[in-house]
Image (spheres, helix red, strand yellow):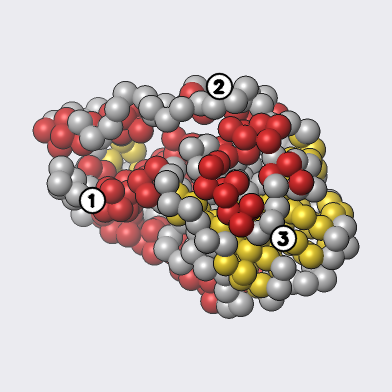
């Protein structure tokens, strides 16, 4: 595994980028200033060697940390902390409603359907479905290191503040991409550690991980109206001072998804598998993008089904059965 080179992205904040499944790069942020030594997110469970190397390159031993803050429970953000166990120092802080972090993390995720099971249930029977399922093992083969439990768990409530040295981190509701998602706002400095809420590309919405599209849409539109941090530190990609632009882009993505699925339904019976390209010879990044697309469409179809607008037939095809409400009504819902 290549050793990441920490990059200082703000005064006293370093990004340590590690990689995991499908070569996906994720940010862990080390904050070292005002008497605080804080790590935000921990990367994949298979990337601890790289994460620890990045910390040591900055002169920090993993067990010297004061606090570990988690934005959400997806394996590329919390998995490293679960795998590391006692090797990471300090309290491990997350929202009090975060079910996977309050019990055995591996048992929680192993109980969810695999990609193969989920796609098998989503796609209509036929050659396309058979070809797609060949790309996936029956169960994620990644190792399950450690006991499956975070040490020194310290759950907090939305709106509460965790003091570390001279810094204060407010727990901000960020649910949707993961039903347990939060962000961490340092109000004096205007720093917002936002996890996967606002990304350059559309934020993935994965039904098999219980992501919730209406909840995510409510989060990004609420943030666009009510937050104005000076620096946005995302879980993937580069930090930016253009928060308003990032929020507007994510709001537009939710509108575009709604319109795109509405158009597909208007065209007649719709097979979600038609969104998948020929993946047999695709590179990992292309496979990931294709499945993010189909997961987003499935999330939107699920919402429309709950509204009585769309229905999946016995043939596995989706049909529009009632007029769609305007998008603005879904923002206000």
Q: Nearer the viewer, mark 2 or mark 3?
A: 3
> Distance from label 2 to label 1 (Cα)?
31 Å
Q: Is residue 182 left or right of residue 80?
A: right
Q: Quadrant of the C terminus?
A: bottom right
* Residue 95 found in image quarter: top right
Q: Residues within 10 Å of mark 3 (few under 14, many from 20)?
A: many
Q: Position of residue 154 (x, y in %)?
A: 79, 38
> Distance from label 2 to label 3 (Cα)?
31 Å
Q: Secondary structure at mark 3?
A: strand
- Name the disc covering residue 31, or none: 3
Q: Is residue 159 left or right of residue 218?
A: right
Q: Position of residue 263 (x, y in %)?
A: 28, 58
Q: Residues within 10 Å of mark 1 (few under 14, many from 20)?
A: few
Q: From what the image shows, is residue 297 above or below residue 91?
A: below
- At x 77%, y 55%, the residue is 37
Q: Nearer the viewer, mark 2 or mark 1?
A: 1
Q: Position of residue 234 (x, y in %)?
A: 57, 61
- At x 15%, y 46%, the residue is 281
> Which residue is denoted by mark 1 in the rendering?
283
- Tell me which numbered mark, 2 or 3, is placed earlier along the sequence: 3
């Amino acid at each position: 595994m290549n050793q990441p080179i920490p990059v200082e992205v703000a005064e006293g904040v370093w990004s340590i980028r590690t990689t995991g499944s499908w070569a996906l790069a994720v940010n862990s942020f080390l904050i070292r200033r005002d008497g605080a030594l804080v790590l935000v997110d921990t990367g994949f469970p298979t990337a601890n060697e790289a994460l620890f190397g990045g910390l040591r390159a900055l002169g920090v031993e993993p067990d010297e940390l004061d606090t570990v803050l988690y934005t959400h429970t997806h394996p590329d953000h919390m998995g490293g902390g679960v795998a590391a166990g006692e090797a990471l120092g300090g309290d491990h802080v997350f929202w009090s409603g975060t079910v996977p972090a309050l019990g055995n993390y591996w048992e929680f995720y192993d109980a969810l359907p695999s990609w193969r099971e989920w796609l098998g249930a989503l796609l209509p029977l036929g050659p396309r479905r058979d070809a797609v399922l060949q790309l996936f093992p029956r169960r994620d083969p990644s190792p399950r290191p450690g006991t499956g439990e975070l040490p020194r768990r310290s759950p907090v409530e939305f709106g509460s503040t965790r003091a570390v040295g001279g810094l204060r981190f407010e727990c901000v509701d960020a649910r949707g991409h993961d039903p347990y998602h939060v962000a961490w706002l340092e109000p004096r400095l205007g720093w917002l550690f936002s996890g996967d809420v606002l990304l350059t590309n559309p934020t993935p919405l994965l039904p098999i991980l219980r992501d919730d599209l209406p909840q995510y849409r409510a989060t990004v539109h609420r943030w666009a109206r009510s937050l104005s941090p000076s620096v946005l530190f995302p879980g993937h990609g580069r930090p930016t001072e253009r928060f308003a632009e990032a929020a507007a882009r994510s709001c537009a993505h939710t509108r575009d998804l709604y319109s795109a699925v509405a158009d597909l339904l208007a065209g007649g019976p719709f097979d979600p598998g038609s969104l998948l390209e020929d993946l047999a010879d695709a590179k990992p990044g292309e496979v990931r993008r294709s499945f993010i697309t189909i997961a987003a469409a499935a999330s939107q179809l699920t919402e429309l089904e709950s509204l009585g607008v769309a229905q999946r037939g016995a043939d596995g095809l989706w049909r529009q059965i009632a007029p769609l409400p305007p998008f603005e009504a879904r923002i206000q819902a």
